[in-house]
Image: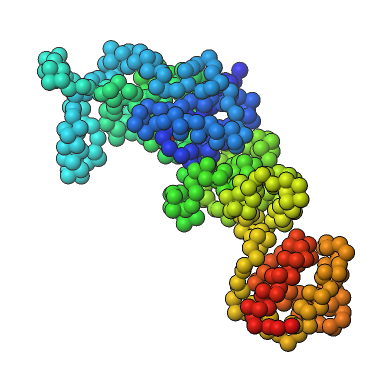
Amino acid sequence: MSKEVRVRFAPSPTGPFHIGGARSALFNWLFARKMGGKLILRIEDTDLERSSRESEENIKAALKWLGMDWDEGIDVGGPYGPYRQTERLELYKKYTEKLLAEGKAYYCYCTDEELEEERQALIKEGKMPRYMGKCSHLTPEQIAAYEAEGRKPTVRFRVPKDEQIHIHDMVRGDVVFESNGIGDFVIVKSDGIPTYNYAVVIDDASMHISHVIRAEEHLSNTPRQCLLYDALGFEKPTFGHISLILGKDHTKMSKRHGATSVDQYRQLGYLPAGINNFLALLGWAPNSEQEIFSLEELIHEFSMEHVAKNPAVFDIDKLNWINQHYMRQLDADAFFEAAKPHMIAAGYMTGEEDGEKLAWLQKVVATAKEHVSFAAQIPACVEMYFNDEFSFENEDAAAVLKAETVPTVIGMLLEELPKLETVDGASVKALFKSIQKTTKLKGKDVFMPIRVALTGNQHGPELAEMVPLLGIERTAKRIRASLAKAGITL
Ligand code: GLU
């Protein structure tokens, strides 16, 4: 019988939840769901200075927002808890005592200064800096002397010599490391807190993790972890290291490339469906050309065999394209809800509106539906409905109003507009048509001056959409102000 699939997402809660972390979580989640396995959420908080509960909360909130759930872990519990490393210190201690008793680990009393000296000396000799084993065979007398000095020891793992460490990685294939390239490394710090490489092994083994899917940057840690699995007599999981995420310029993704945390994208009004879809394609590719995937489809299609070795490039234009697809799919209410915080932030609404005002806002916001990639773009897209005091976009726009025929066109419009019984798209269109017919002008010579007079701009939404939303009064007021600005009298 094949082993139950048990994967884990094990973030360190040390800051904003990075988009790369979300991608690791998603790949684990998809793999678990696809294989009918379990996802465990474990918090790796052994960096006491940098870890915070606030960051842990952020991670949880982001995962929930993205629609990912977990079967065991913090909050939900499970048979192998606790699921926060700082609550598992007793367990690590038990294994440390075992390793010490078996001579597979030893106390090291070297100070930071001594270690740095050794490092520099090795670098000077052109050798790879690593711990050379100064404390690996201390006598009881030497230990007593160090203790008497009040030195607090770390615990180091005794790395076996001349071993080859073979890793069969689901993504990277066979990778081989030499144990001689690894110095005896610290597994427990002088304050008794385990290091990442040590705690992760005990946790993954004791939580019966079958597959470790994580970022490529941890590949170099894997040989150390494999040595620990062997020393502790644990069975190794299958590893899968997913590629780095690079910016569009092919350097490592960083703040320079724009927003890097999930929360920033949430605040900009990207949709979970868009983010998930985009993240899935960061390193994984389906068999087909399909690019739009719902979570359900992703679960169905996802496989580690199609996770690529080469780095994934974070292409914001692609994210925007994908997210736009999901923005367009929102129904009117959901689109309005998505717009709301951004409209409030822009000062275009308070959120308290009701009745006619609310209905008007809903119509205005709806005009942005086809034109935005994410909700924070909505206010700029509807700005013209709120700002009566605009200036001409450029000289070309102003020049449009200088045409000979403009006073006739505008004059007719201002005269006929108040006579409309209903002001809607159809009646406004009909009015434009009749002006065109009477003046015998080309469509452009009718529409363009009206557009510029109304918005200061040569481009923008349909006039027939805009005029009813602005209403006759504001339309007329804007046009008169523009004519005055351009020095035109009717
Ligand atoms: N706490 C580690 C990190 O956030 C997890 C590494 C792993 O998955 O083993 O990078």
Q: Position of residue 341 (x, y in %)?
A: 61, 46
Residue 472 vs residue 346, the one in the foreground: 472
Asked if residue 353 is positioned above or below residue 116 in the image, the reply reads below
Q: Where is residue 287 in the image (x, y as percent from the top left)?
A: 65, 44
Residue 360 vs residue 92, the one in the foreground: 360
Quarter of the rendering occupied by the C terminus: bottom right
Residue 311 in sight here: no
Quarter of the rendering occupied by the N terminus: top right
Asked if residue 41 is positioned above or below residue 433 in the image, the reply reads above
Horizontally, residue 67 falls left or right of residue 14, namely right
Q: Which quarter is ligand 1 in?
A: top left
Asked if residue 23 is positioned above or below residue 252 in the image, the reply reads above
Horizontally, residue 301 falls left or right of residue 125, namely right
Residue 179 in sight here: yes
Residue 488's image quarter?
bottom right
Residue occupying the far bottom of the picture: 404
Residue 28's image quarter?
top right
Residue 326 vs residue 9, the one in the foreground: 326
Q: Residue at x 37, y 14 (%)?
A: 90
- Colour pattern: rainbow
Q: Where is residue 375 in the image (x, y as percent from the top left)?
A: 62, 50
Q: Position of residue 217 (x, y in %)?
A: 42, 39
Residue 302 vs residue 257, the one in the foreground: 257
Q: Residue at x 28, y 23 (%)?
A: 191
Total number of numbered discs in the rendering:
0
Q: Residue at x 43, y 37 (%)?
A: 15
Asked if residue 393 is positioned above or below residue 56 in the image, the reply reads below
Q: Residue at x 19, y 24 (%)?
A: 109
